[in-house]
Image: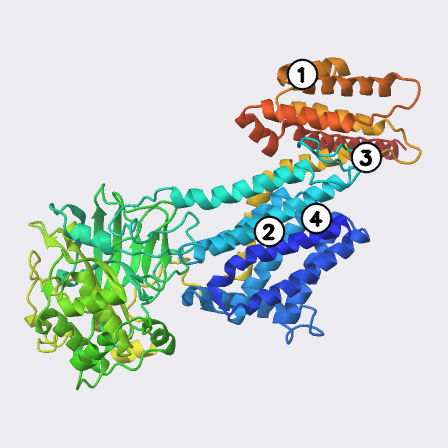
Amino acid sequence: MSGRGRLALCAALATLAAACALLPLVDPATWLLQAALLLGGQTLVGAAARRVPLARVLTVAVQVLVSLLMLTLFFARDEALAGIIPGPAALEEFQRLLSQGGHDVGRYAIPAPVTDGIRLMLVGGVLVIGLLVDALAVTFRSAAPAGLPLLALYSVAAGLARDGAAWPWFLCAAGGYLLLLLAEGRERLSQWGLVFTDRGRPGAPPAQPGSVEGPAMAPVRTGRRIGALSLGLALIVPAVLPSMGSGLLDAARNGSGGVGENGGTVSAVNPLVALQDSLNQPEDRTALTYTTNTRDTQEMYLRIVALDQFDGSSWKPSERRIDAVPDPLPSPPGLSPDVATERVRSTVVAADWYAQNWLPMPYPASRVNIGGAWRFEPEGRTLVGDRGETTRGARYVVESLMVQPTEQQLRRAADPPEPVAEEYTKVPESLPTVVRSTALRITSGATNAYERAVRLQDWFASEGGFTYDTQAKAGSGSAAIANFLKSKKGFCVHFSFSMAAMARTLGIPARVAVGFTPGTAGANGQMAVGLKDAHAWPELYFEGVGWTRFEPTPTRGTPPAYAQPDTPDPSENPAEQLPDRGQSAEPTPTPSESDECTSEEKRLDPECGQAAPPPDSGGTDDGAPVGRAAGVAALVLLAVGVPLLPLLWRRRLRARRLRARAAPGADPGDAVLAAWRELVDTGWDYGVVPEDSATPRKAAERIARIGDLEQGAAEAAYRVALVVERVLYAPGPQEGAEVRADVLEVSRALRDAAPRGLRIRALLLPPSSIRVIWRLTGRLTRVRERWTSALRVRFAK
């Protein structure tokens, strides 16, 4: 196999190694075999095109075409012409699959099933990354920048996987990249002609002219050492650096919180320690204040996040995709128009010291008006700060619905949808049997899910002999729940987690919400929420009502009216409802939805009674349209590629100049002059601006002086200048066998002597790249002069 072929194979292997980091995100992993098959075909096509040879751009174009044909064969065969040629129907199928994939990504928790849409996104994404890596490393012969696409592929997995991608996947991705760099280094060294053995080690045999035997070459051995050191630092440094966090949901000791810089997914949160610390503060500091237009402030629980994943060791939220905040927010899941709701508008102000990545707000919110970089997580209906955005000093307005189901509506609730029941009734195998047996004993004789939920709530709140104690040891695992049921002493975390776990064993979808109770009313009607109002409560799902709050913690919060069957139903006799403290007894001017629309109108039009969205406000989108995805991909490629153009052009020009060979019948001094131009441009990149009037000796002297070269490198620069003078002025042809080595020595010396900022500028934005603009300008000038001359001759006649 040729050196270029080995490099192409290493590029494909590096891409597959980085793609392995995506394996924990989905189940099963059969998609990787399909991606490997298509990636192999793409690599073979590229190798054949380069062997023809085709122009570089045409090589990439052929690979793109063949990749599209292969994707069509595997994913849109029935809609394609002859089963492989994509037509309009096949493109529509691709759009449908991408939309389905985007919807499935936001719907399923990790690991997600490999649906057709997710499979297309995975396989297509690996092919795109593989094409970029192959084009950069093999077609354009620049393996170092090929690490950026590989990093992007690994970063997706690291951002979505639980607690980040595990270190074995990082080793796979990093090892693939190092393999690619090693292959490129060997391929470049093989073009130098002679391969020198390492004479620097004691006892090494002397180098023989033309010898290719012996120990590993010094550059290769040094590269191995650098690679091993880099991998070691990348794995060890993150492990020893301390983590930082703040806010109510600070999980510095038991988990992580917030979102990453990309804002693409929601990270896992463990709020136990921080919540308990808040409740045990000696001083109740005010974290939030708000005003609202509802009388029923006892229902104004400010919800922060929903913990819906119970793995036996802790409760935490599933990692899900987050999007831009829509206006208005999508309708709450499972809420029927037959259930009465009241529209509530609240203005919330956060204290300057309260920094929280999750936005506290009533559930379910229908519209949020807040400035800053906030993102929306649809499943939990939460807002998450992106790029370090927090609630510190924030002021925002929330429009929400106060859901008021009746006892009968909850009793008659239908079975939950299968996806909801499947995801939210999972319990770990480690859950002690006493949890389920106790739940069955408490709910014995209950005929429906609502009765079972109320009995669980009442048992914890009053009938089971439990004591509220914030000094109890925090814990949310299976053993902690069993210990709590035995000791009967704990705080809101223990009550809510235990009731949610019990509800799941009974087949009732359940999760835990974390946030604040409504707070305390002031004389001016403003509500103040302090750290000691931090709270956790269970939410149970009832079809037609949606996620419904219950309150099992004694002496904390207020059980909702629908969870107190012995109390009058407020929707049946609203005139007898007592006003809340600090609120006016006047009826609210905002009518409920039941006042605006009849049940029949709501059945025919679910949006009846809802505020109409403003024009062009957009809405929810189950998937990413192909046009938008392509536009985003193009912007990302431009953002990454354009800054790298000077670097890529400079590397390509340097390689061409230093590989220059005299063609048959051509002047052998052309290679020397090309190397000299490279030496002058390298000096320019490191701050030695060339002077057109300077002789070669004078130019070499300036490079040695301004570049602060050591004795050996300065002598190398003078040797190159002498060879250039012989080429320019000697009567016969002149060759310089050692010119290339001298130029490389001077280049290394300039780089080593330059300060860090100058080295970075010389790499990413070399001043000598201005020659591209000069060359284009010259060509445009010649073309203009040619056309001007032609037009003069034509009109002169």
- Label 1 residue SS: helix
Nearer-N-terminus badge (4/3) = 4
- Disc 4 target residue: 138
Q: Look at the numbered disc 4 and give the secondary structure of its residue.
A: helix
- Write down the residue under mark 1: 711
Q: Residue at x 39, y 43 (%)?
A: 240
Q: CA distance from mark 2 to mark 1?
A: 40 Å
- Residue position for label 3: 787
Q: Is residue 549 visible?
A: no
Image depth: mark 4 or mark 3 in front: 4
Kindly report the distance in space between the C-alpha atoms of the residues bearing marks 2 and 4.
15 Å
Amino acid type at image mark 3: Trp
What number of labels is visible? 4
Q: Position of residue 349 (x, y in %)?
A: 21, 47
Q: Amino acid at mark 2?
A: Gly
As measured in the structure, the alpha-carbon distance from the residue carrying label 1 to the one carrying label 4 is 37 Å
List x then y, in percent, for residue 279: 15, 53
- Mark 2 or mark 4, earlier in chain: 4
| Quadrant of residue 329 within the rendered picture | bottom left
The disc label shown at residue 176, or none: 2
| Disc 2 versus disc 4: nearer the observer | 2
Numbered badge on residue 451:
none
What is the C-alpha distance between the residues marked 3 and 1? 53 Å
**Which residue is drawn at the image coordinates 16% and 63% (left, top)?**
299
Residue 411 on image: x %, y %: 21, 82
Q: How is the image coloured?
A: rainbow
Q: Residues within 10 Å of mark 3 (few under 14, many from 20)?
A: few
